[in-house]
Amino acid sequence: AQSVTQLGSHVSVSEGALVLLRCNYSSSVPPYLFWYVQYPNQGLQLLLKYTSAATLVKGINGFEAEFKKSETSFHLTKPSAHMSDAAEYFCAVSGSRRDDKIIFGKGTRLHILP
Amino acid sequence: EAGVTQFPSHSVIEKGQTVTLRCDPISGHDNLYWYRRVMGKEIKFLLHFVKESKQDESGMPNNRFLAERTGGTYSTLKVQPAELEDSGVYFCASSQVGRARNEQFFGPGTRLTVL
């Protein structure tokens, strides 16, 4: 069965500092992995996705994530945080069947300090 | 192109009442999913439609929840009777069948509060 674990329910970084949000996955088959973001009072928006084409995945708003099979990790990074990045971020994995449900982590709320 | 829309955005009801949530998927998306996030917990899958057929309803918590997708377009999720533990945010998502590595597009959610 697939699952994801996000380390840290709250992360605070200073504006301009590196953003690192951690995610580890468990999957019995090659996974499809996702990062979603939820800005205040908005729905879930796809940041990026890993579908086995490349291990370093670039997403929107300057975010990227690296798939590391040996570490079963898919951490999200951004070199320089902006105030507008304050949001809740969800790591997720797709089930093994075609068009399967998405399984989410508990979410990490990112706070940006001025 | 319009995204996934959900109605209402907020609903406050009393325990024992009935509430119906609606989801309009992106046009042409045959896959439609319902998810729920109760406070402090992760977002959890409820069920999956392909057109009007229920493909997977393994996440439905109990028989107080009834989902329909007549005609394979919009979907409704009815909770009857509502209980306190049903409070949370209900998300709908849609995707094209077999395309784009299961990229699902989410609606803004309906926040349900049961008093």
Image: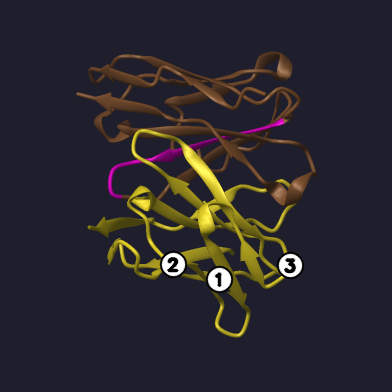
Colour in which the image shows chain A: yellow
* CA distance separating discs 3 and 1: 16 Å
* Most foreground residue, B46 or A41: A41
Q: Earlier in the sequence, mark 1 or mark 2?
A: 2
* CA distance separating discs 3 and 2: 20 Å
* CA distance separating discs 1 and 2: 8 Å
Element on which disc 3 rests: loop
What's the amino acid at mark 3? Ser
The residue carrying pointer 1 sits among few (fewer than 14), some (14 to 19) or many (20 or more) residues within 10 Å by Cα, namely some
The residue under the point 70% across, 69% down is A29
Span highlighted in magenta in the image: B31-40
Q: Is residue A20 left or right of residue A27?
A: left
Give above or below for B80 relative to B59: above
Q: Earlier in the sequence, mark 3 or mark 1?
A: 1
Q: Do labels 3 and 2 touch, CB within 8 Å? A: no
Please provide percent x and percent y for residue A56: 64, 71
What's the amino acid at mark 2? Thr
The chain ID associated with circle 1 is A
Q: Disc 1 designates what residue?
A: A26
| Chain drawn brown in the picture | B
Q: Disc 3 designates what residue?
A: A52
Q: Main secondary structure of the magenta part?
A: strand
Element on which disc 1 rests: strand
Q: Is residue B83 left or right of residue B6?
A: left
Q: Disc 2 designates what residue?
A: A5
